[in-house]
Image: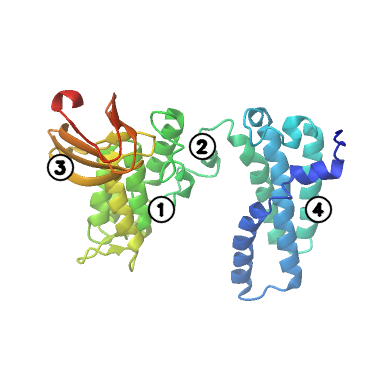
């Protein structure tokens, strides 16, 4: 059976991900929310049409630029190998022409608004063009959008470090170094979940001292960290802490901080996101001696352990549902070879 060649129009629709509207829908809801807030209510049909169509057009233009930037990498990924540019069905010049035409139509729409909106559209266009290419020159593309002077507590661009698993000091050291740099630039200030999240970030970077510092700040009297930070905006970013009843201060209160700090604390003692159970990956000096029981690890394992002077003295791993299992202690990797219901007790000799 002979397959007829696809029309240029069909290829262009593939290029702009017309069959995957989730992309522009995710951009549309914050755009329209901001529009409603700015207008203090319904903005009118004209602005609604301009910003809705503009969002769809600029997202489509961004797809064109993105696929040009990623064309050499997409060939090696099954999911993207048949994209129009990667497969050769659409040339780079043709794709950029489509993107430029879409951006031009969006700009014409913007011209029907007002001067400030037109002015802001130009740097927005710059971000649309620049962002896809930054992935090939920087360990983290968000470095182009982040600045060392920004001390705001929001760090969602580090999702791949935690709770994601794409950034790791062992597997992706350059990305881990970039994550550390942005965390150092942002500082330790924060409130609620943002402080707990930074604590988890430092644990994933195997920096127990910095994670412990975040924990101390999260448990401090609300606002007590402001004097430590001493940078512009730190008085706003350092109102976090805990009240006498241990409820986390956002303020007034954010349960995310309590739950997040608990999760981050466990990350300091045990991590299992990299297909192995790593023990004491971010142990601070303040916890030189200790013991824990009943920690759950991914794969269906239950872990008890004790340590002294920062070194493990006793470890028991029970397979609740999991099979096999790999244990990491520093640079040492131990195959557990467990079946459901079995427990393995490791000796000091095995752990050293």
Residue displayed at 77% across by 54% down: 106
Q: Position of residue 100 (x, y in %)?
A: 78, 44
Describe residue 45's horizontal placement relative to residue 186 as left or right: right
Q: Position of residue 115 (x, y in %)?
A: 72, 61
Q: Position of residue 281 (x, y in %)?
A: 28, 35
Q: Earlier in the sequence, mark 2 or mark 1?
A: 2
Q: Earlier in the sequence, mark 3 or mark 4?
A: 4
Residue carrying label 3: 291
**Callout in the foreground (2, 3):** 3
At mark 1, the secondary structure is: loop
> Alpha-carbon neighbours of circle 3 within 10 Å: few (<14), some, or many (≥20)?
some
Residue 104 visible, this orientation: yes
Which of the pair 23/322 is nearer the observer? 322
Is residue 140 positioned above or below 116 on the image? above
Residue displayed at 12% across by 33% down: 309
Q: Earlier in the sequence, mark 3 or mark 1?
A: 1
Describe residue 87's horizontal placement relative to residue 279 as left or right: right
Instruction: Find residue 105 and name its label.
Output: 4
């Amino acid at each position: 059976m002979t397959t007829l060649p696809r029309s240029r129009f069909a290829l262009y629709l593939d290029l702009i991900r017309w069959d995957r509207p989730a992309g522009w829908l995710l951009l549309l809801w914050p755009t329209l929310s901001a529009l409603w807030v700015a207008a203090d209510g319904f903005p009118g049909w004209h602005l609604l049409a301009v910003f809705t169509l503009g969002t769809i057009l600029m997202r489509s233009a961004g797809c064109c630029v993105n696929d040009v930037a990623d064309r050499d990498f997409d060939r090696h990924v099954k999911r993207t190998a048949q994209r129009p540019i990667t497969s050769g069905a659409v040339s780079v010049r043709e794709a950029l022409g489509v993107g430029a035409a879409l951006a031009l139509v969006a700009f014409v729409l913007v011209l029907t608004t007002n001067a400030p909106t037109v002015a802001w559209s130009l740097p927005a266009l710059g971000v649309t063009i620049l962002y896809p290419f930054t992935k090939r020159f920087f360990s983290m593309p968000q470095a182009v959008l982040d600045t060392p002077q920004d001390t705001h507590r929001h760090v969602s661009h580090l999702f791949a470090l935690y709770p994601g698993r794409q950034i790791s000091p062992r597997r992706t050291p350059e990305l881990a170094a970039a994550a550390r740099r942005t965390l150092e630039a942002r500082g330790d200030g924060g409130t609620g979940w943002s402080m707990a999240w930074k604590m988890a970030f430092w644990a994933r970077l195997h920096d127990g001292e910095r994670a412990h510092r975040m924990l101390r700040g999260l448990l401090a009297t609300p606002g007590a960290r402001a004097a430590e930070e001493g940078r512009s905006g730190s008085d706003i970013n350092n109102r976090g802490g805990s009240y006498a009843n241990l409820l986390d201060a956002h303020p007034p209160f954010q349960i995310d901080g309590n739950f997040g700090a608990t999760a981050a604390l466990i990350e300091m003692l045990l991590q299992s996101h990299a297909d192995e159970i790593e023990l004491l990956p971010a142990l601070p000096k303040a916890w030189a001696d200790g013991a824990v029981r009943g920690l759950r690890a991914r794969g269906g394992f239950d872990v008890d352990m004790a340590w002294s002077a920062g070194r493990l003295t006793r470890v028991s791993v029970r397979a609740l549902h999991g099979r096999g299992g790999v244990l990491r202690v520093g640079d040492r990797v131990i195959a557990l070879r467990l079946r459901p219901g079995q427990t393995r007790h490791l000796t000091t000799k095995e752990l050293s």
